[in-house]
Image (spheres, rainbow, N blue to C red):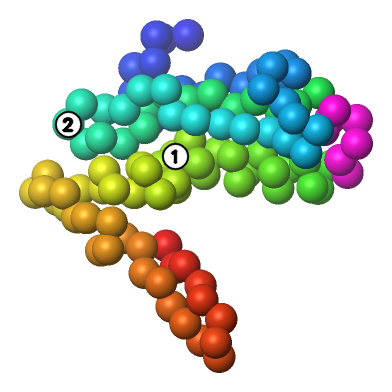
Amino acid sequence: GNGGEATDLILYVLTTSQHCESSTAAYSLACMNDPVTRRPIMGTLNVCPNTLNSFPEDKLLGTMVHEILHVMGFTDDAMRLFIDSSGRALGFDKVVRNITSAGNAYRRQ
């Protein structure tokens, strides 16, 4: 390859049983953020081996999409790092809102 030039996100996907509890299907995390924009530029996604054999293909795909969104910054911790076009921190309350409807609380991101 070209060493990652003109690449927005490098994602390492692997399957290992390390850190896989009986109820863990997959997990992911961002490993490196851009020093200026703070956006994730490298991450890893691990699919637990037991998931490969026990999940239907559509559920496995949905789980992987969910985990990729975490790598891309859709987590409570990462949302605190979001910035505006001037580079100023937005703050968690500008990114995430709690909504109550008919007595049920929802978090909207």
68 left or right of 82 in image = right
The amino acid type found where label 1 is placed reads: Met
Q: Residue at x 56, y 81 (%)?
A: 104
Residue 94 screen position, x and y as percent: 25, 63
Disc 2 secondary structure class: loop
Mark 1 residue element: loop
Residue at the spot 25% in from the left edge and 35% down from the top edge = 38
Nearer to the camera, 109 or 18: 18
Q: Quadrant of residue 72?
A: top left
Residue 56 seen in the figure: yes
Magenta stretch? 50-56
Tell me where residue 13 appears, x and y as whole percent: 62, 22
**In this rendering, is residue 42 above or below 102?**
above
* Nearer-N-terminus badge (1/2): 2
- Are there few (<14), some (14-19), or many (20+) residues within 10 Å of tag 2? few
Q: Which residue is mark 1?
A: 72
Q: Which amino acid, mark 2? A: Val
Does residue 105 belong to the magenta stretch? no
Q: Nearer the viewer, residue 97 or 105?
A: 105
Residue 29 % position (x, y)? 50, 30
Q: Report the residue that reaches farthest toward the bottom.
A: 102
Q: Residues within 10 Å of mark 1 (few under 14, many from 20)?
A: many
- Tally the marks: 2
Is residue 7 visible to us here?
no
Give above or below for 1 relative to 28.
above
Badge 2 is on which residue?
Answer: 36
